[in-house]
Image: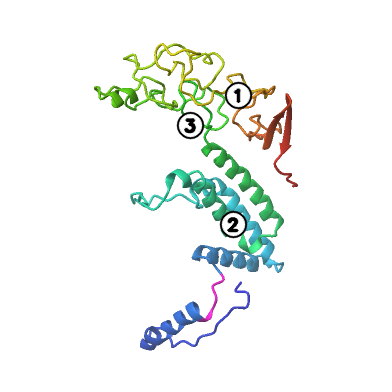
Amino acid sequence: MYDGKVEIAAMAPYNRSEYYRESLSELAEAVTERIDSCYYSGFTFMRALKLIIAQIAAKDWTDIDSKRVAMTVDILRRNLTSAVHMGCLSVTDTNEELRVLDNFNTQEGVPDFPVAVGESSISSNTTDFCDDDEEQRLQLEANVALGKVKQGLSVCGCKCSVCFWRCVMEKGHGDRHSCMGSHLCTENCSYCTREGDSLSLCGDLAGHEGNHNCKRKNHTCGQSCYLYETSSNCNEKCSLWPGQPGQHKCDSPQHMCNRKCSLPSCINPCAVAIESNHKAHQCNEKYCPTKCTINGCSSSFQSSTILEQGFIIKKPLQEVTI
């Protein structure tokens, strides 16, 4: 039970003044300084003590390590969902308000924080038997659960179906892409500001490129851009001065192809420039959007997808042997 780490300390009889004045302080010194801790908490000590008492009562003289490992794995497996979501075995109401950390970068840290906490909870409870088969099975189950959490925290990132902002919905959602905003630009008109007129809000869609135009005055040509019908990020209206010769062109620096991605089941538009001579239309998504075909698995197929010469090539990221 103590792995040979036992310290013997002489103590005065109970209920004598020496017991409280000297013996307890010597015992505390022996526990804190002369003996290395074998248990992480009182809970782990109590669990080991109950297991030993149960084996003695049953006159079971077999190795205790295998039963200790099985008990720990069983506890972790039953509390795996709580460990993944909350980072602890049980959720307790402490009636304390949540504190805001000023030195915590939420934009960068939030997607990885729950996954890191879940991994830390599993690894810290399996350090004593990291090479055991049961622990490896538990780790695989934890990786699947953590993968679902990480996938749920990943945002789509494709272009919004209405404006030019990025979609903030769950990755692989399958619905229309949406930035969840008003889709309207909230900046002041660049031309009104430059001319010193009363400021008006921009009349273009949110996230557009180039100058802000209120479109209430004849700041620009206003005719449709010659690439409007074939581009997915065209700002629609010509940004040249009225009456200027040549083709009508908006202020988007590079127009992207608006054809649908060549990958089957993908609804995203092509992210390749119109000027580029391309046969295969490829969106911004780097991984295959198709769900795994194994029964009971709802995860996305983890392979990088490359379109070359009109052919779809899938390259697995890694091979996992179970």
* Residue 293 picture quarter: top right
Viewed as shown, does residue 268 lie left or right of 137?
left
On residue 92, which mark appears? none
Q: How many marks?
A: 3
Region in magenta: 34-38
Amino acid type of the residue tagged 1 in the rendering: Cys
Q: Earlier in the sequence, mark 2 or mark 1?
A: 2
* Residue 1 picture quarter: bottom right
Q: Which percent across, then down, holds residue 285? A: 60, 31
Amino acid type of the residue tagged 3 in the rendering: Val
At 48% from the left and 17% from the top, the residue drawn is 249
Query: Which residue is the site of mark 2?
Result: 123
Question: Which secondary structure type mostly characterizes the magenta part of the structure?
Answer: loop
Viewed as shown, does residue 86 lie left or right of 185?
right
Amino acid type of the residue tagged 2 in the rendering: Ser
Query: Which residue is the site of mark 3?
Result: 168
**Pointer 1 local density, CA inside 10 Å: few below 14, some 14–19, many at least 20:** many
**Pointer 2 local density, CA inside 10 Å: few below 14, some 14–19, many at least 20:** some
Query: Which residue is the site of mark 1?
Result: 270
Tell me the element at label 2. helix
Give me the C-alpha separation between circle 2 and circle 1: 42 Å
Above or below residue 198? Residue 144 is below
Q: Earlier in the sequence, mark 1 or mark 3?
A: 3
Give me the C-alpha separation between circle 1 and circle 3: 19 Å
